[in-house]
Image (spheres, rainbow, N blue to C red):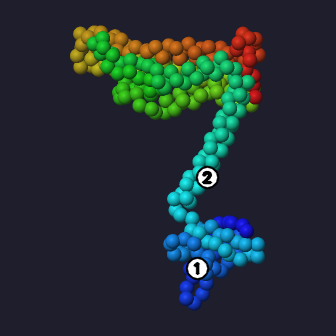
Amino acid sequence: MKTNRGTVIQVPSATGAGLIFLDGQQISFQIAGIWQSPIAPAINQTVEVSVDDAGDLTRIVVIDAQTLAREKLSQFAGIAGGQSQLAATQGKAAFEILRERMGMPLMIAAAILVLLWFFGTGLNLIFGGVIVKSFSVADTLSFDLNDPTGSFGFWSFLGLLAVLAPWATSWVRARWAPLLFCAPLAIMVLAYARLSWQIYRKVAQSIETAKQFGGSQAAEAAERMAANISSQFAFGFAFWIVFLLSIGFAVIGVMRFKGLPLPSILAKGKSP
């Protein structure tokens, strides 16, 4: 005798037998002597069917919804566990490739760079000697004197690409790939130049307006006020750490590009 799962596809009636789809075949059945569940047959019921050695049905039992739900949950958990294990295996393999090609010291430095880039204080806005607002390094890239919200924008997106560029050196197959280490420093220099230009333009506009409408005395007053604009901004601790790390990455990138020898602790990484 063997037992298997089947599905009711036709309910027995006074004019004919019922049908169960079992192992790719339609098998007829009657309720009397075979149906051993307290509930009546219904279409699409999942049933457990026992068949004797002669191939005749001997017992039909409905599988209750709770049992089916538990089986589905167990099956889902098994699939999820398998996918999680696969993801963990693939993640470990990717980590090993990164460690081999980039080197653990640079991986740690690059991770610190990313964390400080998005979560460290890059710029403080100061009024009356009090910090009224702080911006991350990423938000600092999009800072605008006309709208000092520091929201994520085009420049912040470029910064995101730049801060991830050192990681890409492990996968880019090109001679110039080590120069990607220079990307964080390049975007920081551009951001500083952009902020300096905004301050200079703001100062120049204020002085020019004062000269046109208030004469020389107003112009002198505007110059004194303009001189205070720069003092309203102060770079945060994260900016300086990120700046130093960026300089270090740039030096390493140029040395790797030119094939110059690096300290042993930094020479473990290699190109793909």
Q: Amino acid at mark 2?
A: Gln
Image-quadrant location for residue 235:
top left
Residues 113 and 196: in front is 113
Residue at the (37%, 13%) spot, across then down? 230
Residues 57 and 198: in front is 57
Residues 82 and 69: in front is 69
Q: Earlier in the sequence, mark 2 or mark 1?
A: 1
Residues 50 and 212: in front is 50
Res 111 visible: yes
Image-quadrant location for residue 266:
top right
* The C terminus sits in image quarter: top right
118 shown above or below 264: below
Give the mark toward the camera: 2 or 1: 1
Q: How many marks?
A: 2
User: For this view, does 39 lie left or right of residue 71?
Assistant: left
Residue at the (59%, 69%) spot, across then down? 61
Residue at the (61%, 52%) spot, across then down? 75
Name the residue carrying label 2: 75
Image-quadrant location for residue 123:
top left
